[in-house]
């Protein structure tokens, strides 16, 4: 899932303090699981901002709302009319949600209340860790299911650098050396020899290319188009 | 000859090679490089010109290597994967070759969080590159030199002729993988290898045996890295904090003894420890050169270049061959 963290409160306050009518708008999918931007967090943030506004003597109407997902139009379409009555949307969705809503809402600014951080898992409640970099060219079958792109501080592809110490990375003893983990895992799987092959320079165009990366599923689009046409036909009848 | 560098010639002649290290300054003043080059000249076959080691901004390796070459000391320029993508790397390699540089050591580079182990501010907020890793970088150099092709496939009219080096941390973790780590660099095209500093010669012998069993000593020239110890404190620090380095207790105790012999006289303690450090280095150099498959030593006297002369002479490695 996408893991995000709320921005420092003062930074959020600086963003919103000159607006008159603000909607703190939460998303109940990924960012709710990481306790950053679901309906509960949107409500708490709205309350804190109201208190701050009253302390600062600012008259700002601050409301809150949340929907299931900010990355698909059908979820926020029913909210659109209400959202357009505000002069600022303070989104507690991830960066995808902020972009997506900005494109659709018209001349109303959408500001981020979160710092979108990484794709991660929840090994234990309240703890999140990045495990995938979304590089667009997966090699986990070659590295024992442990990603060196996301988890090695240098994204090395051919084994550890000289900085491994007690299984930790040279950057910090709080960071596992990804290559240490990969090697130990491959030993257990009996596939260590896979690591003896040189991985050539990667084609990073799947990771950072010209403009946003897109995926188009033609069969799904063709199906949807067909469905739409037949619906129109039925309506015309 | 692949490059025709002095280092390559000495290795090819079967004589033990000696390389040293020259760290460029954090300023635009070339004189420090020239001075250091003068001190090292004649006592090593080539000197590594570090590429912003510990992620601190210094005169670039290529520029400093050129200055060193002009001053009469053959440089081993370094190229880290940290700061450049493959376009910048190859452009710099072409430029370096055009300037007459002939040795290049490929390394990953210390992470930008390092900032001289916290002694300087550094640039911990910098964005690192790591478009390619060391192994891939070695392969790029070889492809450029031997096939006359850029990594992307475009032709190079006049290929850069480098003697290609890579580093090896034989006692890094996981230790049983390290010989294979070396093999990958050799397979990629490393002509010579400089190891991380070695104090535990017994452990290094074991790793060298594994490297020999893979036949690597015949395909690359392994130079054993020796970091000249200055004090007991430095040895303790290296042992506890530098990855892939273990210092046997007797060595630390020898240094402590040297320090204690001076009593409260701090100046004397420094002198005695430095003398002991040079003695230890000479012993380590001699031991390393006896290990089958070793083709030379890489002696790092960090910010203490003047120690090299005494070490090389005492180790019986002077005068250096003139080929």
Image: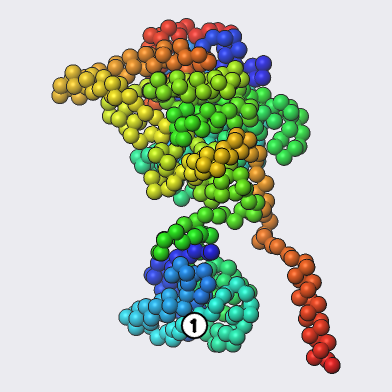
Residue A67 appears in the figure = yes
The subunit carrying tag 1 is: A
Towards the viewer: A219 or B308: A219
Residue A155 image offset from top left, x and y in percent: 55, 45
**Residue A93 drawn above or below residue B41:** below
The residue drawn where x is 75% and y is 70% is A220
Towards the viewer: B310 or B60: B310
The residue drawn where x is 59% and y is 35% is A193
Residue B72 appears in the figure = no
Residue A12 image offset from top left, x and y in percent: 43, 71
Towards the viewer: A131 or B243: A131
Q: Residues within 10 Å of mark 1 (few under 14, many from 20)?
A: some
Q: Which residue is mark 1?
A: A65
Left/right placement of residue A37 relative to residue A10 reads right
Towards the viewer: A153 or B88: A153
**Residue B181 drawn above or below residue B70:** below
Residue B179 image offset from top left, x and y in percent: 53, 28
Left/right placement of residue B120 relative to residue B43 reads left
The residue drawn where x is 46% and y is 31% is B175
The residue drawn where x is 66% and y is 61% is A212
Which residue ends up furthest to the bottom in the rendered image? A237
Q: Which colour scheme appears in the figure?
A: rainbow
Quarter of the view holding residue B184: top right
Residue B193 image offset from top left, x and y in percent: 54, 24
Secondary element at tag 1? strand
């Amino acid at each position: 899932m996408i893991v995000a963290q709320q921005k420092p409160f003062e930074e959020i306050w600086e963003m919103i303090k000159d607006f008159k009518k603000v909607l703190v708008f939460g998303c109940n999918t990924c960012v709710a699981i990481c306790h950053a931007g679901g309906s509960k967090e949107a409500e708490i943030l709205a309350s804190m901002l109201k208190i701050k506004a009253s302390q600062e003597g600012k008259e700002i109407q601050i409301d809150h709302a949340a929907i299931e997902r900010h990355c698909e139009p059908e979820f926020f379409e029913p909210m659109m009319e209400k959202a357009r009555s505000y002069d600022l949307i303070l989104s507690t969705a991830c960066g995808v949600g902020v972009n997506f809503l900005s494109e659709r809402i018209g001349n109303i600014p959408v500001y981020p209340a979160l710092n979108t951080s990484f794709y991660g898992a929840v090994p234990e409640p309240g703890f999140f860790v990045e495990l995938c970099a979304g590089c667009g060219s997966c090699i986990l079958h070659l590295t024992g299911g442990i990603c060196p792109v996301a988890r090695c501080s240098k994204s090395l592809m051919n084994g550890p650098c000289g900085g491994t110490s007690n299984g930790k990375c040279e950057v910090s003893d709080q960071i596992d050396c990804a290559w240490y983990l990969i090697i130990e895992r491959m030993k257990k799987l009996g596939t260590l020899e896979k690591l003896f092959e040189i991985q050539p320079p990667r084609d990073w165009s799947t990771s950072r290319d010209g403009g946003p990366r897109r995926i188009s599923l033609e069969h799904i689009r063709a199906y949807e188009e067909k469905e739409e046409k037949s619906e129109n036909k039925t309506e015309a009848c | 000859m692949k490059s025709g560098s002095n280092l390559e010639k000495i290795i090819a002649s079967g004589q033990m090679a000696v390389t040293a290290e020259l760290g460029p300054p954090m300023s635009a003043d070339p004189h420090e490089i020239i001075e250091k080059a003068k001190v090292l000249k004649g006592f090593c076959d080539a000197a590594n010109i570090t590429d912003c080691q510990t992620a601190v901004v210094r005169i670039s390796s290529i520029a400093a290597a050129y200055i060193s070459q002009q001053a009469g000391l053959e440089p081993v320029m370094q190229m880290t994967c940290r700061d450049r993508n493959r376009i910048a790397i190859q452009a710099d390699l072409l430029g370096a070759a055009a300037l007459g540089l002939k040795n290049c050591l490929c390394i990953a580079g210390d992470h930008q969080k390092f900032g001289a182990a916290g002694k300087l501010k550094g640039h911990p907020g910098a964005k690192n590159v790591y478009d390619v890793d060391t192994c891939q970088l070695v392969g790029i150099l070889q492809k450029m030199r031997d096939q006359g092709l850029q990594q992307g496939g475009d032709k190079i009219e006049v290929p850069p002729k480098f003697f290609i080096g890579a580093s090896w941390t034989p006692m890094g973790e996981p230790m049983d993988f390290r010989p294979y780590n070396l093999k990958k660099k050799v397979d990629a095209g490393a002509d010579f290898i400089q190891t991380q500093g070695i104090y535990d010669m017994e452990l290094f012998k074991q790793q060298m045996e594994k490297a020999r069993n893979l036949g690597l000593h015949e395909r690359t020239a392994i130079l054993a890295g020796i970091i000249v110890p200055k004090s007991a404190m430095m040895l303790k620090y290296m042992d506890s904090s530098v990855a892939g380095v273990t210092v046997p207790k007797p060595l630390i105790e020898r240094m402590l003894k040297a320090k204690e012999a001076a009593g409260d006289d701090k100046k004397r303690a420094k002198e005695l420890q430095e003398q002991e450090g040079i003695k230890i280095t000479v012993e380590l150099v001699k031991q390393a050169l006896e290990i089958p498959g070793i083709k030379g030593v890489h002696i790092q006297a960090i910010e203490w270049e003047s120690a090299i002369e005494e070490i090389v002479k005492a180790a019986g490695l002077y005068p250096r061959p003139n080929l």
